[in-house]
Amino acid sequence: MARDPSPEDLLPLQPAVFHILVALADRDRHGYSIMQDVATRTNNQLRMSPGTLYGSIKRMLAQGLIEELRDAPDPADDDERRRYYRITRFGRRVASADAARLESVLRQARAAGLVTRRSE
Amino acid sequence: MGDRTHLWKRIYDRLLSLYPAEFRDEYGKEMVTDFDERMRTESPLSLWPRILVDLAITAPKEHMDMLMQDLRYAYRSLRHAPVFAGVITLTLALGIGANTAIFSVVHAVLLRGLPYRDSAKLAIIWSPNRLLNIGLDELPTSAGDFYDWQTQSRSFSEMAAFRGRPFNLSGTGDTPIRVNAITASGDFFRLFGISPALGRPFTREEDSPGKRQVAVLSNALWRRQFGADPNIIGKSIQLNGETHTVIGVMPREMRFPQGAELPAFYGFAAQPDVWVPFGFSPEERRNRGTHNILVVARLRPDESLAQAQSEIEALQAHIASEHSDGSRGWGAHVVSLREQSTGGAKHTLLVLLAAVSLVLLIACANVANLLLARASARRKEIAVRQALGASRVRLVRQLLTESVVLSFGGGLAGLLLAAGLTRAIVLLSPPGIPRIEQIAINGWVLAFSACLSVVTGVLFGLVPAFHISRVAVADSLKQGGGRGSVSSGDTARRLFIVGEVTLAVMLLIGAGLLVRSFIRVLGVEPGFEPGSTLVMEVGLPPAKYRDPSQQSAFFDRALARLRNIPGVQTVGAVSSLPLTNNESLDTLSVEGQPQRPGQALLCDTRLTGGAYFEAMGIPLFHGRLLTLADQMNTLPVAVVNETLARQIFPDRDPIGQRMKFGDAGGKQPWMTIVGIVGDVRNTSIEQKPRPQIYMPYHQAPTAFLNIVLRTAVAPATLTGAVRREIATLDPDQAVANIRTMEQVVSAAVATRRFITLLLTLFAVLALLLSTIGLYGVVSYTVARRTGEMGLRMALGATRGRLLGMIVGQGLRLTLVGIARGLGGAAVLKKLLESLLFGVNALDPWSFGGAILALLVVTALGCFLPARRAANTDPLKALRQE
């Protein structure tokens, strides 16, 4: 199969996909943990519903952005019902490419005077 | 609380079944766990709306995703098998295309509503007469009865009467033309609820003697004859020599009555050209003796056909008792206009629809067989996918997607085919199919063929899909995807072949019966010689030729002039031509033979003049023919046909016997029989001639005659000369419908030719498809048994024996199919009985022919692969194994 598409092929990412990648960037997580992380980071502004979350996960697995782990990263944390996901190297490249794209968009917006306060 | 959480969880679990099974299997458990967690932190009121919205958006998306994936996979796998895909597409295109074409006809003719306001409520009211005993209910009404119905019936909100008459239209160009006029009562247009494109319809007030000279033009006549003149309203036209004012032009959809909507023997033209009011005098309105108008009516909204029928029946019984002189015996019979207008074509179309669906079933069976064969070849691929975790549902769905993709390909190609076929059907179609000009590939037809594609896709895909997905993983992988043992697939394949042959036998027998009937029909002696005969219609306008002697004088002069045209041998005239489904029926009394009550003697009367019998080639058996010497003031005479002579005078010489129309004591004059001529098929080729009487037109003058020329040259070449001669007599006189008698005969068998042709086409298609099917199966089996063949040959089997064995196996399937098909032919018998002529529904020739055709063609289909197998080198075959 023809794999290894360049990261740019997938840009711009769907917001849900981007947030899932960000959530997995620091550690491996299961679905519910991803959902919680995204909610916390966005001050509850983005609350992913299950269909969106697992639909995105399904497509991201197919695209090679993330992979499923055989065992739980922390044995103590192991929950029979849970499946854990990890960001792939390709996933990282795609996420940073999209982040760079967003940054440049933000820069342009700022130059145009659309952003009044510097966001943290 | 815990209970409630449990309940919510269960509901959510149930809702997850909206997702595709694969998605649910993969993530369902986790989704429920997540839901459980969220229930702890969020209130159901805020959680549920979001969950439901999410479900509504993502479930269809996942399904779509799955479908796209299946489609991509199907496309990829079919691209690798172009021949396979091509053969299937073509097979399906033939099946779906033929069905779509026939459906487009059925839709236009049977299904689509009539273009009038609330057309389901329109009905025709006939006047059957039980005293006449002629086996026909669709008889016209008298003006007296009609006006009584109109004023007294409560079941109908509106009622109108009409009749058709040819009119001469002159003063619009150089040559006068004959137009198909409808004279009608004042309410005619209001009843249909169609407003004119220009001007206004005529009114009730204009339906009276002094005011009736107004005309409403059909859209076609307005365009054809008046160049779509927008200022036509108020202009004058000459109809039958009388000035009429054009008051309206109808829109295109107003075409009532079309010839094909009413019984053919009324002789209505295909489409009306102009409508004018009856203009009956008070005396004419009271006439109960002449039944010559038809009644169309609109049921009240809350009234059913049955209610209206019983009401009008009672009303008519009352009228008949009050007017026992004129209305005695006449009843009333209500038929919905829709039923009436499709009655004739319905059966033909249903037979064709049945035939064409059998063809589609055969095509489906064929394709299913091809898919089964391919399925066996794909065992390994399927097993691998199963091993990788694809569920059975997923595999079946994948395979079904593939077959639906194929059937859509077939459907698209079929649509192209249908477009061509539909055009051919319209061109070939016989007169008598109403609204045939409206046949089109429209939205309904597209929807039909799309549905058909999906249904056939599932139909032929289902068995192979289930079959293949049942293959055990381990088994297949062990076999290495090679040749398996005899499996359930083989059984299915055989069943399909047997089914195909069964259907093909039925179609072939049906076609055989129709072809044999057609041959019989062509072999019928019509009683005249149609070759070298030119015929035309001449209708004199009563306004100009008011006096009967003027009418006869015109025809005398016309016949004399036409006889002098070089190339013309003899000339005659007759009130209606043979084979045109036109009869003028009268009751007859014979001198010295008291009439038995309830047994009216019915005969078909024709007025003739000139050398009609010679011109038409009707032989004289006895006595003399009618001559110019038989005039108004001489002895009333008649020539009768053989059937009349045999039926009424079985034991004495008819010559010199006297008969009269109506009762023996009536006012009609006695006619003396002077000659006996051969029987002529007047209504149709199929119908046996009834007693016929020919009278000289001098003794019963008429304004309308068909002129018949027997020619020494090609008849069609004389058309111009005929028109010129008539024009020198009367420049305003139209000559209509000039054609050869051969054309008349051909039109008389057109319906039969049409259905025979199409059914034969479908039968041949069925034969072809099932042979291809058998060929495919035998080739496949032979290929799989190469090793066995090699072994048999190595053990001493001769080529001839191998050949015989393989062909024998194929033929055995054919024979089983034939046996079943013969049983199925019993169903056919019912369907086709009314279409058969001179052929028994169990006609051995049709049955034998069908069986022989199938055996020969399928034997060939088996022989080709068998020969290939028998030619294999045993060593090679064994090595391969």
Image (cartoon, coloured by chain):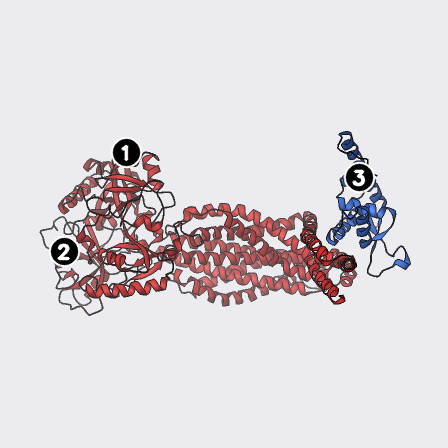
User: In this rendering, is residue B585 above or below B235?
Assistant: below
Q: Quadrant of the C terminus of chain B?
A: bottom right
Q: Is residue B731 left or right of residue B269?
A: left
User: Splitting the image into 4 quarters, where does residue A107 fall?
Assistant: top right
| Residue type marked 3 | Asp
Which element is circle 2 on? strand
According to the picture, the residue beneath numbered tag 3 turns out to be A98
Mark 1 chain:
B
User: In this rendering, is residue B433 above or below B805?
Assistant: above
Mark 2 chain:
B
- Mark before the other along the chain sequence, 1 or 2: 1
Marks 3 and 1 in Cβ contact (< 8 Å): no
Q: Quadrant of the N terminus of chain B?
A: bottom right
* Discs 1 and 2 lie in a common subunit: yes
User: In this rendering, is residue B471 above or below B418?
Assistant: below
According to the picture, the residue beneath numbered tag 1 turns out to be B173
According to the picture, the residue beneath numbered tag 2 turns out to be B637
Nearer to us of marks 1 and 2 is 1
Distance (Cα) linking label 1 and label 2:
42 Å
Chain rendered blue: A
Dot 1 surroundings within 10 Å: few (below 14), some, or many (20 or more)? few
Nearer to us of marks 3 and 1 is 3
